[in-house]
Structures are given as structure tokens and as C-alpha cells.
Image (tube, rainbow, N blue to C red):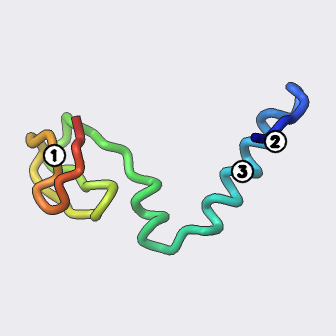
Amino acid sequence: MLAVASDDVEVAAEALRAEWRGLLDEEQHAAADLVLDFSAAEMTCPACLTTFATGPDECPECGLNLG
């Protein structure tokens, strides 16, 4: 648990995000930056980075539930 003054919530949140992102490798950064667009023709799975035609409720490669 982390306790911060209400005036410092945004600064603390940004510090935690920066710390977390510093622990990621290049592939994990790519996955963390993905936005799932279900109206696009293709999408990329945030778990395994497989690109596939939009439609299924789960990734055809790793089975991640996207719904």
C-alpha cells in the first residue's frame, strides 16, 4: 500500500508508472502501448503480439480472451 497526500496523487502515479515501465523489455513496452481497436481490420494481441483479422473473441495464437 502507498499513502500520499491528495495533492501528490498525480506525481506519485507518474513515478509508479515510470518505475514499472523501467522494468519492461522492448517487447513488453510494445505490448503495454497497444490499444485494442475492435473496429479495425486487424488487431494485435497484447499478450503475444500476434496480428490477426479482427473478429474472434480470443487470440488465435495464445488464447487470450479479448472480449
Name the image quarter holding the N terminus.
top right
Element at label 1: loop
Picture coordinates of residue 16, whole percent (x, y): 72, 51
Name the residue at 46% across, 55% down: 32
Rendering coords of residue 35 (x, y %): 37, 45
- Tell me the SS state at disc 2: helix
Q: Which image quadrant is residue 37 in?
A: top left
Closer to the observer: label 2 or label 3?
3
- State the quadrant of the C terminus: top left
Estimate how packed mark 2 is, as few (under 14), some (14 to 19) or many (20 or more) residues with alpha carbons within 10 Å.
few
Q: Residue 58 carries which label?
A: 1
**Marks 2, 1: nearer the viewer:** 1
Which sits in the foreground, 51 or 1? 1
Which residue is tagged 3? 16
Percent x, y for residue 8?
87, 34
Q: Which residue lies furthest to the front in this view?
A: 1
Query: Do tag 2 and tag 1 residues touch (Cβ < 8 Å)?
Result: no
Q: Which mark is residue 11?
A: 2
Marks 3 and 1, Cα distance to the nearest angstrom? 30 Å
N-terminal-most mark, 2 or 1 = 2
Instruction: Decide which of tag 3 and tag 1 comes sooner along the chain.
Output: 3
Q: Name the residue at 49% across, 64% down.
A: 29
Mark closest to the chain's N terminus, 2 or 3: 2
Q: Callout 3, which amino acid?
A: Leu
Tell me if residue 20 comes above or below residue 55 in the rendering: below
Report the Cα–Cα distance between label 2 and label 1.
36 Å
SS at mark 3 in the image: helix
Q: Residues within 10 Å of mark 1 (few under 14, many from 20)?
A: some
- What residue appears at the point 9 percent right and 50 percent down from the top-left corner? 53
Q: Position of residue 34 (x, y in %)?
A: 39, 52
Amino acid type of the residue tagged 1 in the rendering: Glu
